[in-house]
Amino acid sequence: MRVMGFQFKAGYLNCEEVRVKDIQNQISGSPFFLYSLKKIKENYQAYITALEGIRSIVSYAFKANNNLAILKHLQKLGSGAVLVSGNELKLAKAAGFDPHRTIFNGNGKTMDELILAVQNEVRVNIDSAFDLQHIQRAAKTVGKRVDVLIRINPEIDAEVHPYLTTALHDSKFGIRNDRLTDLLESIRSSDLLNLVGVHCHLGTTIKKVSIFRDATRVMMKMIEVIRDKGFDIQYLNLGGGLGIDYEKTESVPTQSDLIDSIRELIPDDLVLIIEPGRSIMGNAGILVTRVIGVKTGEYKNFIVIDGSMTELIRPALYNAYHHIGFIEPVDGEVNTYDVVGPVCESTDFLAKDRDLPTPHEGAGLVVYDAGAYCYVMSSNYNMRMRSPEYLVNGDRVIQIRRGET
């Protein structure tokens, strides 16, 4: 059985050509994150294939997973970079990304970060009137003109968890339409800002391509307005946000579904930029844990594992769903369990009300789709150490980050 880039053979989960249980037995750290390089490349190539015939840049969102080894592989594939902090910019330089295919986003960029961005000639998104002033000040300090895009809030509902939407009227991100004219005049009056494009980002885990199509229509109207004011707009950046099949329903749109939904709306004189993160990394990674024990009760049954909300906070933070399974044969009686960690919080759960076979102590339990927004959101709460990360390339297992000690 194949599960999102990983497959079972003789009852054991394999990552590419390696049995995951063998990895668990051979390393000292548990839990750990495990990634498939083949799946990362497949996901990236799916965008390249989908975009054939459209002038475009695929720019990977570093915030999804910022492991340097993975970034270097994506850079070699030709990816651009999308950054939200100065440290991510430093990481992009270390990984060899082309600064002219790099975009610096964020609603609260500091002066130090902006100066670093201008020095390295990356494109910067304007998120507010004060952000524009800060970008201009950084450009003056460095003595360089900077290419900028305007992040426009299209006020479109992404139909996702409220914490994951970024383009509604009450969002902290982007420029409202009623502020656009004043912003354009400020750019026009500056010798240090060169407006080259517009940007939006609707949210994340989006499962309807019609939402991207609606946003594209809105943004094309904005481009027409801005061009009518004399600006040479070259780039339309639609952000990222495409969801993945966490629930294993096989009903989530593909990269091709997304691009096909907007293809006819993109004119030849624009370069389309997309900013995928989750849809490149999400299903390319898993969190591998061990069962500490099973606790049964009149009202609830629990599988207690050594993984927790400190490794994977999405269920506790967003009530997010991750598919749960075992990496090895487990033939105990099937029961309904909550899968929980050892952290001293009632919200420390990885899954609730799952029908699972009762595992033996030490059994390997896997949390699927842990390649994006998992390690990067981990913490040291309860003085727990961050986990190691491993990358599988064929039959090779490479440690790409050591566990904290």
Image (cartoon, rainbow, N blue to C red):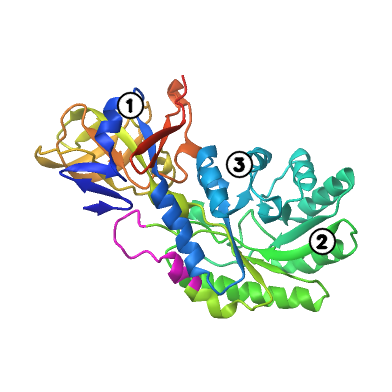
Say what amino acid the circle numbered 3 marks. Ala
Residue picked out by circle 1: 342
Residue 89: percent from the left, percent from the top? 67, 42
The image shows a total of numbered marks equal to: 3
- Relative placement, left or right, of 107 versus 374 is right
Q: CA distance from mark 1 to mark 3?
A: 36 Å
Q: Counting residues from the N terminus, which is met first, the one under dot 1 or under dot 2?
A: 2
Residue 211: percent from the left, percent from the top? 50, 70
Within 10 angstroms of label 1, few (less than 14), some, or many (20 or more) residues? Answer: some
Name the residue located 78 percent from the left edge and 58 percent from the top edge: 147
3 or 2: mark nearer the eye: 3
Residue 64: percent from the left, percent from the top? 51, 46
Name the residue located 46 percent from the left edge and 53 percent from the top edge: 280
Residue picked out by circle 2: 194
Q: CA distance from mark 3 to mark 2?
A: 27 Å
Within 10 angstroms of label 2, few (less than 14), some, or many (20 or more) residues? Answer: some
Q: Is residue 192 visible?
A: yes
Q: Quadrant of residue 22?
A: top left
Magenta segment, which residues?
A: 245-259
1 or 3: mark nearer the eye: 3
Query: Mainly helix, strand or loop, the magenta region?
Result: loop
Query: Label for residue 95?
Result: 3
Residue 317: percent from the left, percent from the top? 44, 43
Seen in the picture, residue 223 relative to 125 is either above or below; the reply is below
Secondary structure of residue under mark 1: loop
Q: Counting residues from the N terminus, which is met first, the one under dot 1 or under dot 3?
A: 3
Say what amino acid the circle numbered 1 marks. Pro
Query: Label for residue 155?
Result: none
Q: Is residue 117 magenta?
A: no
Within 10 angstroms of label 3, few (less than 14), some, or many (20 or more) residues? Answer: some
- Relative placement, left or right, of 404 versus 189 is left
